[in-house]
Image: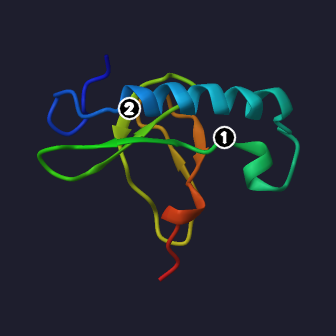
Amino acid sequence: MYNCPYCGKDCVNEAAVNIYLKMVEKFFKYQNKGSDITFEKYPTVGEVGECKETGGRIYLCPYCKKPFKAYYEKDKVVITCPNCGETLCLPATNRTFC
């Protein structure tokens, strides 16, 4: 069981975690660390839930397998896991450039 990074409760969707971790296995199999294409070089962060108290989105890092508060940085398509420091791609639907 994963604790919500916002409220500490059970807001993380375990089924979403399992699906994401299975899916990201394929990424690591074909990962191209030398690529100039961001999504070939870094895995996409997993969207695994929403805090029931705050409504905040919850991301999961495929490296340390720990949830963290979703965030983004303007004009960037990658973020850093606050738990382990690894670089992750933002899902295309969560990128903003305005």
Residue beneath the point at 55% across and 72% down: 75
Residue type at mark 2 is: Pro
Give the residue pinned by disc 1.
43
CA distance separating discs 1 and 2: 15 Å
On the image, the x and y values in percent for residue 3 come to 25, 25
Residue type at mark 1 is: Pro
Q: Does 16 appear above or below 14?
A: below
Residue beneath the point at 20% across and 40% down: 6
Residue beneath the point at 24% across and 32% down: 4
Q: Quadrant of residue 45?
A: top right
Q: Does 63 appear above or below 69?
A: above
> 50 left or right of 81?
left
Can residue 62 be seen here? no
Residue beneath the point at 66% across and 32% down: 24
On the image, the x and y values in percent for residue 90 come to 55, 54
Numbered tag placed on residue 21 in the rendering:
none
Q: Earlier in the sequence, mark 1 or mark 2?
A: 1
> 70 left or right of 77?
left
Numbered tag placed on residue 67 in the rendering:
2
Q: Does 37 appear above or below 75?
A: above
Can residue 17 be seen here? yes
Q: How many marks?
A: 2
Label 2 Cα crowd, 10 Å radius (few <14 / some 14-19 / many 20+): many
Which secondary structure lies at badge 1?
Answer: loop
Residue placed furthest toward the top: 1
> 61 left or right of 56?
right
The quarter of the rendered structure image containing the N terminus is: top left
